[in-house]
Amino acid sequence: MLAPPFLQRSRPRRARSARRTALHRAGALLVAAALVALPVGVSVGQDDADDTRPDLANPIEAQRLGVALAGLIERARLIEQLTAETSREYRRAAQRRREALEGLAEAARELDQAAVRPRTLTVSQLEELTGTVDQARQRFEVEDRAVRRQLAGLRMLVSERDALSVRIADLKSRLPQQQEMLTGVWEVTWMPAGVVGTFYLDQSGTLVSGQYDLGTHGSGSLQGTFVSGKLFLQRIDSRRGRDAEIEGVLSADGNSLRGTWSAYEMVQGGTPHGQWVARRVP
């Protein structure tokens, strides 16, 4: 017999679950990278009273701290995505629980109406109505547990988001303040192929983000740090994902950059690498 509409289960939500799992894994990798990048003596716990402050006059230490901060900020962005997704899942689960509760109330009402008219009631009808109530109650319990799981996940994510916010503010306070010299448009030449493209950079303190366009050779986003005149970026291709590391230095007049790049993906003969130069577009 076909179950009543209020007993029919919704479609499996495997795609959304897989997406959340992928975001969790990506976030975990970013946190691990951030912890590795932290300078020696920088604690990640809540009690920083006994921290040994890193020597930020040392550009290597400052850059490592900047990389760690970039990793935590990216983790915070992923947590925000997960929080929004979990909130949507909670809303859907709560709606299913309401529907299950309404189904349980409807099944109980039909049983009550039949039970108060025993002259027309048969044993088979009573068993069928009682079975329907039991099924409706089971479905409500299933949906109620789903709501509780989503709520627990939401609580965990909000807690992590708040902790990351405190940690990010702390790391930002440890970094030296500097003029935001990289914000703008840069014409880039990618060697040895001689590919000409464009970097669109936005600097906020020591953090650098932006977009790049190398024409037929790809486009995507850039993320990294700029500390003591030294630039470190990760190139994230719009199709392939993270595909190269970029290092460079800013010229004394602030109008040109030059450095090296190295791809993540190995090909026959080794890892692709080369040099690059850029000039500021007025």
Image (tube, rainbow, N blue to C red):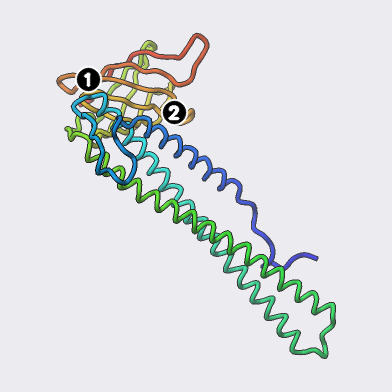
| Mark 1 closeness class: few <14, some 14–19, many ≥20 residues within 10 Å | some
Residue located at (51% from left, 14% from top): 267
Residue 144: give x, y in percent of width and height: 58, 64
Q: Nearer the viewer, mark 1 or mark 2?
A: 2
Residue located at (36% from left, 18% from top): 261
The outermost residue toward the left is 253
Badge 1 marks a residue whose secondary structure is: strand
Residue 34: give x, y in percent of width and height: 37, 34
Q: CA distance from mark 1 to mark 2?
A: 25 Å
| Residue 42 appears left or right of 36 | left
Tell me which numbered mark, 1 or 2, is placed earlier along the sequence.
2
Q: Quadrant of residue 2?
A: bottom right
In this rendering, the count of numbered labels is 2
| Residue 255 or residue 105, whichever sits in front | 105
Badge 2 amino acid = Arg
User: Which quarter of the figure is the N terminus placed in?
Assistant: bottom right
| Mark 2 closeness class: few <14, some 14–19, many ≥20 residues within 10 Å | some
Badge 1 amino acid = Ser
With respect to residue 21, does 275 lie above or below?
Answer: above
Badge 2 marks a residue whose secondary structure is: strand
Q: Quadrant of residue 234?
A: top left
Q: Label 1 belongs to which residue? A: 256
| Residue 156 or residue 107, whichever sits in front | 156
Q: Label 2 belongs to which residue? A: 242
Residue 254: give x, y in percent of width and height: 18, 23
Q: Quadrant of residue 224?
A: top left
